[in-house]
Each structure stands twice: as C-alpha cells, then as structure tokens.
Image (cartoon, coloured by chain):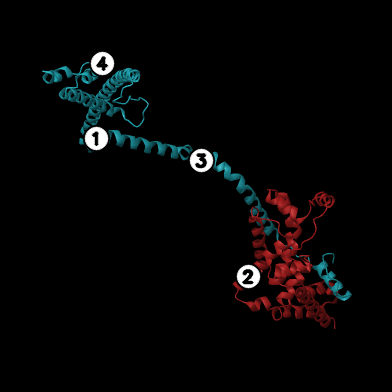
Chain colours: A cyan, B red
C-alpha cells in the first residue's frame, strides 16, 4: 500500500487488497516478451543502419549516376549549341559574319571620328592660345593708351562658353572689327582708321583687310 | 494545479540545492531517457518492472489472455516506437497507462460494445458463482479459490471502478495520476474506488456466508 495516497480504506478493505496483490501474479508469455524485445532491438538498430546505407551499401553506379547524368546533359547542350545549331539554321553563320563586318565598319568610323575630333581640338587649342596672346597684348596696349577696348579678353577658364563656339565668336568679332575699320575709311576718319588698322593687323595678320580697304582709299 | 503563481525567486543557495540533487538512475523516467539514447538494457529493466501490472490491467479488463496479450503488446510497441519522440512531461507510469487506457477504449469501440466495457456484471458474475460452487465442493482449496474469487469479483466490477482499482493496485498509480489518465477529477476516482470496495466486500461477504 505504499503507493496508495489515500487512507480512507478500512482495515478490512486493506486486507482484501493485500490479499489481491499477493495473489495477482499473472504475467505475459515469453513469446510476447521476445516479440517486444525484438521490436526494441530493431528500433535501436534502425538508426545505426541509416548512415551506412548512404555510404557503404550503395553501388558504384548508384553513387555516380547523378554526376554522370549532369555531365551528359552539359555535353549534349554544348553539342547542340555549337554543332547542331548551324546545321539547323545555316543562315545564322552568314548573319554572324555580317554582324562582324558591320561591327568592324562601325569601329573604323568611330576611330575616324575620334581622329577628326582630336584634330579639331588641337586646332581649337592652338587658336585659343593665339587669341589669348593677342588679347593680352591688346589689353595691355589699350590700358596704356587709355583707349576703349572693343572686345573682351577671352577667358580659358570660362565654363559657360563651350570650346566648339570659340572660333565662330572670334570670327564674328574679327569681322565686326574689320567692318568698323571699313566704315571709318568710308567716313573719312583716317587717323582713327589707321590706329584701328594697326591693331587689327597685329591681331589678325592673315586677314586680307588691305584688299578691302584699297577701293575705299582710292 | 496549473495556475500561475507569482512567488518570490528562490535564493541562490536553494537553487544550488536543487541542482545538486542526485539523479535517480533507477527511476522510470531515467530509464526511458536512457532507452531514447539507445540503451537496450534500460528498456529491458523498464519492461521487467511494468510488464506484470500492465498485463494484469488488460487481463482483468478483457477476461481473455489472448486479447490481453495482444493489447499489451500493442502498448509496448508504441513505447518502443516512441523512442525518438518521447519527452518527459509526466511520470512514465502515467504515460504508459494513458496509452493502455486509450488502447483499451479503442478495443471496446472496435468490438462495438459499450456493454462489453460496462458488462462485467453479467459474464463475470457467472465466474463468481462458479467459484462459489467450487469453494463449497473442495474446502482444501479454499485459500487459492478465495484469491481467484477476489480476482473474479474485481473483473465483475463496472469498467470505471475496475479500471481505477486496477490502476491503483497493479499499476501503483496515485489518485491524481489515475484521474489524469481517465480525464476526471481526483474526487471522482476516490468515489469510484469507494464504490468498488463496497461491491467487493458485498460480493465476498455473500460468498463467505
């Protein structure tokens, strides 16, 4: 009665239960014990067999069939792409050649355009250097003579003026300056004309202003 | 029992006392954990400890050795296969007899006889009466027959009373554990036991007289 947690039984009942426990001794047969123990050992061995199954019990082909099949699929794909494809679509090779030729032509045109751009840039740079020298000398001179400056000194660091527009601006200023000299000649203001002409020739020695002035002076 | 109580934390010294409590290597729970870890010896020890009580639980409830062995084997197979999923949330005996209780209920349902579960009074009464006749025939076997008569009287009890007294006497479960397995209260189990003992006394008193 040590497991009994209630003391409400009478002495007679306790004696009855004690007699029951003494006589209650039935057991299962040994066959049942063997079946249960066999199941228990199977259960314990089952987990030990699982890792062995993956490594040792597999045959050569079972272990290598996955990588071999993957390799075969890769080889077939390569063959289709490089051998079978031109046979199925013969024009695809010509189109590839044409594309290559077009690509070469585009490359050549691009190289030429790059060379032309480089030449233009070198000309622009030379011209800009020349103008800067001329403008600097003119500015100095106008400052000494306290005379009016008719054009602005070109600034190389001016970010607002793009390099491509510099030659046209220079030509415009030159033309306007030449036109003003011609107007002075037409109006008979020869002293003024001579001063401007001298400056102009120094700034633009190659400009044919003499040929334009000759008819007016005559 | 399941209510949450906000108690003050135990002092560190008490915690060390709890931690230093030695593990009972002979307890059912420890043996089951050892079996879960792969120890066959632990299972054999556990089986030897509980096979008698569990078998008698089925034998008294079925009155057939073959059926009792079949149900008994099913229960232990479940324990064997629950090796990986077993988690100690209660006493092992509670765990074992809950499986047994559910298996027995399934067996009764399978037979489609709630009467079979509650029967006892009809079939086993014959056993009790036969024993009483035998007792009168041979006085030398009185003691042995008295034991058999007592077993037969237990078999004659209603199912709920019979199960309660078998779990207590053969399974060595407490009232609370029996109540947990049967899904009822401790007081209900207590009254079932009281009624069972009353019936046993009545039957055995009639036999004596």
Identify the residue position indicated by label 1 in the image: A86
**Crowd class of label 1 (few under 14; some 14 to 19; many from 20; radius 10 Å):** some
Q: Are marks 2 and 1 on the same chain?
A: no
**SS under mark 2:** helix
Question: CA–CA distance between discs 2 and 1?
Answer: 74 Å
First along the sequence among labels 1 and 3: 3
Classify residue B194 by image quadrant. Answer: bottom right
Residue most extreme to the right: A11
Q: Say whether disc 4 or disc 1 marks the residue closer to the N-terminus.
A: 1
- How far across and down, in percent of the image, does residue B97 sit? 71, 64
Give the residue number, with chain letter if any, for mark 3: A58
Comparing marks 4 and 1, which lies closer to the viewer? 4
SS class, disc 3: loop
Which mark's residue is nearer the viewer, 2 or 1? 1
Q: Which mark is residue A202?
A: 4
Q: CA distance from mark 1 to mark 3?
A: 43 Å
Q: Which residue is mark 2?
A: B107
The reply to whether residue A28 is in sight is no
């Amino acid at each position: 009665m040590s497991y009994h947690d209630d003391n409400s039984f009478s002495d007679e009942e306790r004696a009855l239960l004690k007699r029951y426990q003494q006589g209650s001794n039935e057991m299962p047969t040994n066959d049942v014990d063997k079946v249960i123990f066999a199941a228990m050992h199977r259960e314990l061995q089952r987990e030990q067999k699982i890792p062995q199954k993956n490594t040792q019990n597999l045959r050569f082909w079972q272990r290598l069939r996955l990588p071999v099949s993957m390799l075969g699929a890769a080889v077939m794909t390569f063959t289709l792409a490089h051998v079978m494809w031109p046979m199925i679509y013969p024009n695809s090779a010509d189109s590839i050649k044409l594309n290559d030729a077009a690509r070469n032509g585009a490359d050549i045109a691009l190289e030429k355009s790059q060379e032309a751009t480089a030449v233009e840039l070198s000309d622009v740079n030379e011209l800009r250097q020349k103008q800067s020298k001329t403008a600097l000398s003119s500015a100095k001179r106008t400052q000494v003579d306290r005379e009016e400056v008719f054009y602005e000194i070109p600034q190389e660091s001016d970010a607002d003026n793009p390099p491509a527009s510099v030659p046209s601006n220079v030509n415009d200023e030159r033309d306007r300056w030449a036109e003003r000299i011609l107007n002075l000649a037409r109006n008979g203001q020869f002293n003024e004309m001579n001063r401007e002409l001298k400056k102009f020739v120094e700034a633009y020695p190659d400009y044919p202003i003499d040929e334009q002035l000759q008819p007016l002076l005559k | 029992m399941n209510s949450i109580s906000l108690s003050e934390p135990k002092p560190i010294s008490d915690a060390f006392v709890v931690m230093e409590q030695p593990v009972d290597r002979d307890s059912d729970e420890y043996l089951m954990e050892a079996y879960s870890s792969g120890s066959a010896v632990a299972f054999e020890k556990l089986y030897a400890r509980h096979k008698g009580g569990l078998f008698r639980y089925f034998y008294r409830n079925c009155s057939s050795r073959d059926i009792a062995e079949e149900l008994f084997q099913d229960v232990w197979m479940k324990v064997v296969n629950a090796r990986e999923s077993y988690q100690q949330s209660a006493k092992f005996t509670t765990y074992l007899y809950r499986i047994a209780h559910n298996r027995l209920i399934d067996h009764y349902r399978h037979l489609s006889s709630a009467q079979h579960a509650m029967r006892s009074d009809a079939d086993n009464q014959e056993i009790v009466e036969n024993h009483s006749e035998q007792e009168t025939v041979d006085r030398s076997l009185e003691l042995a027959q008295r034991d058999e008569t007592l077993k037969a009287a237990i078999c004659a009890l209603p199912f709920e009373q019979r199960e309660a007294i078998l779990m207590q006497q053969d399974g060595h479960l407490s009232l609370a554990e029996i109540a947990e397995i049967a899904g009822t209260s401790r007081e209900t189990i207590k009254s079932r036991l009281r009624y069972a003992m009353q019936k046993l006394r009545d039957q055995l008193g009639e036999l004596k007289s």
